[in-house]
Structures are given as C-alpha cells and as structure tokens.
Image (tube, helix red, strand yellow):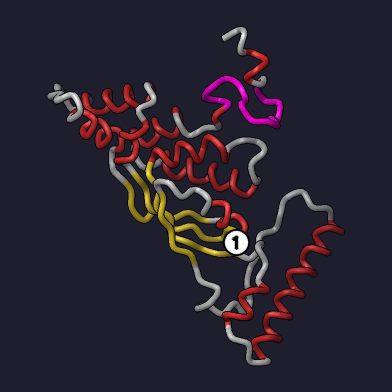
C-alpha cells in the first residue's frame, strides 16, 4: 500500500479560520488569529468550515474491495480509478490478508492463480476486456486518485478507525494520518485532535454492535 500526496491545502487551519472570519466580519489581529478561529469552530462542531481544506492523493497497492468501500464515502469526495475495461491485467498483484494459516494461505493463493490463469486463457480465446474484467477478484490490486476535504476525512476517521472496520481500511487510515501529519503543524493538529474513531471523540460507543473498547451510550446516559 502506498499513498502519494499530489496536492493539499497548505496551513489548513489558517485557511479555515480566514474564511470563517467573514461570517462575523472579524478583523484578524495577528498571524495566528485565523488558526485560533478555526480551532474554535472545529471544537464547537461547525463542520462546514472544514470543507475549505482538502487533499488530493494517489493510492496504489490496495484491493478492489478496499476501493469499493472507499467509494462509499461520496460527500466531499471525488475520485478516478484504474479501469478494468481499458487496462489488460495479464499479471495482477493481489492483497494478502493478515492472520491466515499456512494452509489457508495456500488455498487463497491457488484461487488467485486460478483466476489469473482463467483470465489469460479467455484473452487467448479472443475475449475483450469488457468480458474478462468480470472475472477479476476483489483482492486484485488497484490504484486511484482521490480528493477529499477535511470535513469528509473527519467523518471517515470516525467510522473507519473503528476496530470493527475492514483491517485493510484501518491500515490505510493509519498510513494516511502518518503522511498528513508530516505536511505542516496545522495538519498535525487536525490529525492529532480530529482524525480518530468516534468512540474516542465521544467517550462511548453508539454502534449497535460495539467492540467493547468503550461502554455503550445507553449504559452511561444516566451518568451524562
């Protein structure tokens, strides 16, 4: 799995705060004033302002299954993905799940190899990519260019860093946070303070089936 940052909003808190200041006709007092406004807006839950900052990344070495789940996040996002119609996959790589026994790994790899052999045989028989694309597995590696704003990212981290989320997706979120944290101090603040599962933000779990890391909301509502 690899993430390449193609474009991003520099100093995102400053950008968010500068735009938010127009709502109150606020004159910025110093170079950090916009940043303070942004942090206040974010802490108060004014998520609309977070849409003014975004990133564009190239993602490679993820499974088609992972890409399909990523595509479920549609608000505040846009993406293009490698085609199975215009690209011929004579020798595709694939995602290897963690935790398989040697016997399970052997069966898994045999399935992938059988699919590859069948795909290549269909190509030899003259099948076009419109046909052969149907047999490609969800485990097959793919790549895409993905654009997403901070508000949408905040939501994505709320649900995809949950212990019950797909492991490959959780690995992606961890790697993305590492990459974004290195961009500048303002991205690091957002990563450290916002990019986490919702239970860690709320102090309770509001899912129907939790992992047990935090108590259920109904169990602590009397305390709150």
Packing grade of label 1 (10 A; few <14, some 14-19, many >=20) is: many
Residue that extends furthest to the top in the rendered view of this protein = 223
Foreground of the two, 203 or 181: 203
Query: Which stretch appears magenta?
Result: 199-214
Name the residue: 63% across, 79% down.
132
Name the residue: 33% across, 34% down.
48
Q: Position of residue 190 (x, y in %)?
A: 40, 32
Q: Is residue 80 left or right of residue 120?
A: left
Work out which quarter of the rendered image holds the N terminus and state it: bottom right
Write down the residue under mark 1. 64
Q: Can you say whether 223 is above or below 87 in the image?
A: above
Work out which quarter of the rendered image holds the C terminus and state it: top right
Name the residue: 44% across, 41% down.
153
Instruction: Look at the numbered disc 1 and give the secondary structure of its residue.
Output: helix
Q: Position of residue 88 (x, y in %)?
A: 56, 80
Q: Can you say whether 93 is above or below 14 in the image?
A: below
């Amino acid at each position: 799995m690899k993430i390449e940052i193609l474009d991003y909003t520099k100093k995102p808190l400053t950008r968010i705060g500068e735009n938010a200041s127009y709502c109150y006709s606020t004159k910025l007092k110093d170079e950090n004033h916009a940043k303070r406004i942004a942090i206040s807006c974010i802490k108060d839950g004014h998520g609309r302002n977070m849409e003014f900052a975004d990133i564009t990344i190239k993602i490679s070495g993820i499974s088609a299954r992972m890409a399909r789940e990523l595509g479920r996040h549609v608000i505040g996002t846009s993406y293009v993905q490698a085609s199975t119609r215009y690209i011929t996959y004579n020798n595709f790589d694939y995602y290897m799940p963690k935790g398989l026994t040697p016997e399970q790994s052997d069966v898994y790899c045999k399935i992938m190899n059988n699919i590859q052999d069948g795909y290549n045989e269909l190509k030899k028989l003259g099948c076009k990519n419109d046909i052969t694309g149907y047999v490609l597995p969800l485990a097959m590696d793919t790549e895409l260019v993905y654009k997403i704003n901070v508000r949408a990212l905040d939501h994505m981290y709320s649900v995809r860093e949950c212990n019950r989320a797909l492991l490959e997706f959780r690995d992606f979120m961890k790697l993305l946070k590492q990459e974004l944290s290195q961009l500048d101090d303002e991205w690091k603040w957002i990563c450290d303070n916002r990019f986490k599962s919702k239970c860690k933000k709320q102090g309770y779990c509001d899912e129907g089936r939790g992992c047990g890391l935090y108590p259920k909301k109904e169990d602590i509502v009397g305390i709150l």
